[in-house]
Image: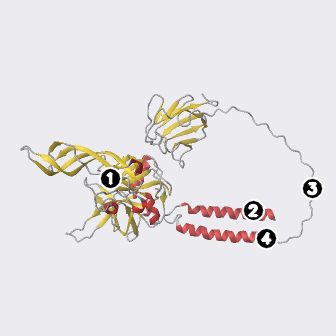
Amino acid sequence: MKRRVLSIVVTVLLLAAMLSGCAGQKTFTTSEARNGVVRVLAFYEGNEYYDLDGEFLGTSTVQTPIYSGSAFGVGTAGEQTDIFVTNRHVVESEVYDYVVMPVTYSDGSVRQETVIVKLKLTGAYILLDDYGFTSANGLDTSRSVPCDVLYEADQDHADLAVLRAAEPIPGRMALPLLDQSVAPEAGSTVYALGYPGSTDRSTMDSSNSVTSYAGSVDKVTVTNGIVSLHTNFVNDNDKKIRIIQHTATINHGNSGGPLITEDGAVAGVNTWGYGQNTNTGDQQAYASIEIEYVQDILDDLKISYDVYTPGKGGNMTILIAAAAGVAVLAVIAVVLVLLLRKRPAPQPAPQPGPRPVPPVPPVPSTPDSRPRLQCTAGTFAGKRFSLDNSVRIGRDPNKNDLVFPASTQGVSGVHCVLMVDGVTVWLKDLGSTYGTFLEGGRRLAANEAVQLRIGEKFYLGSENEAFVIAPKGGI
């Protein structure tokens, strides 16, 4: 009887575990979702300038503006990340901009004129706090993280870009992306998150002479509104881009930030604001690029991300799981009563005689032919590691099997992976910032995999962090 009751208990507990597992989708309040937003600064240089008709005027050192915008993290929802999505126009590789500068004319006169300057991107950075950049001291590299632009759309495509930070941003998490099939309906509430330029005024000193760019989580602004409709936006190249038109206010600096639902899932990328139209009488409206464009880009880049589908997990599932938990406790209580109830003492059963014990077959001794990973230089010099199935290598302790110290130079957060099939080893670069190199200096392309044999070497970033594929016993 006890075995039967215990079997019931195990079954009930397994059922409870399955029900609680249904609550796997994470939801975030609007306040929590602010932790998924970062401030991006882009730096440019240029010395070619043109008049407003496009005529080349000459070259000169020009004080160029700093471009700023917002971005949001993607990856495993709720976990720290180094991948961020923003607008292309925040980090474009080459732009033309208007600046005011002294222009010398043929008669020798010098006048301040508005000219067009050709600018090239020299660096993009994510600010860690409100003092990563000040007008008095410039960029503080200890309070900012450099980024690579993994993807920049051309003018025929949606205004989007993808950044990879040199390391995961402390305290910033990935947000889930809304399932494409369940876009927010007209009339539903949405929230626009980001760093509008007006936020920076709160960091001015009393004389208004020193300004710092806001970059902390508590400076992320939240505006709410409703979805007006899903429609097309025709860009300058007559290409149609699908957008969400809504009433959640977007200002300069919000570009690239997320438009989220009430569950904290990203439905779009904040991009444009429409001014009041005096001809039609339309009031201010705002546009966010549909999230499906982001998902397509991440798929092409082979970057993983979490998708949120309303009704499949989240708050409702948590309530269901909680109710199931109460039911489970009630069943267990009944079972315990059955176990403790007095029952007639069972009569002793006849004891069987001793049963012969079959001999244990010997375990065949076969040599371990699996290859090893041996470090020949750097952090793990002289150490060997077993290779089972796959070994991810990098600095992020949450995403790697072989973890380098956070201060290691030349090793990315997620750098490369070794994949093992029996005695065959494949090395694959995971889009590292510093590069994965074979012996001889050839750098692997991002996501390129090559087969390595016993005795073949590779290194991360430079030959200071070198490895060799070794047999048992080492080389």
Q: Nearer the viewer, mark 2 or mark 4?
A: 4
Give the percent coordinates (x, y) of residue 129: 41, 56
Q: Looking at the image, is 258 positioned above or below residue 421?
A: below
Per the image, label 4 sits on a secondary structure element best described as: helix
Image position of 423 (left or right of 205): right
Residue that badge 1 annotates: 90
Give the percent coordinates (x, y) of residue 391: 56, 41
The residue shown at (44%, 66%) is: 30
Q: In the image as oriented, which residue stretches furthest toward the left? A: 107
Residue that badge 3 annotates: 351
Which amino acid type is shown beneath numbered disc 2?
Answer: Ser
Image position of 428 (left or right of 328): left
Observer-nearest of 284 and 103:
103
Total of numbered circles in the picture? 4
Which label sits on residue 338?
4
Instruction: Answer yes or no: is residue 265 visible.
Output: no
Per the image, label 2 sits on a secondary structure element best described as: helix
Give the percent coordinates (x, y) of residue 470: 59, 31
Comes first in the chain, label 1 or label 3: 1
Label 1 with label 2: CB-CB less than 8 Å:
no
| C-alpha distance separating marks 1 and 2 | 61 Å
Per the image, label 3 sits on a secondary structure element best described as: loop
| C-alpha distance separating marks 3 and 4 | 28 Å
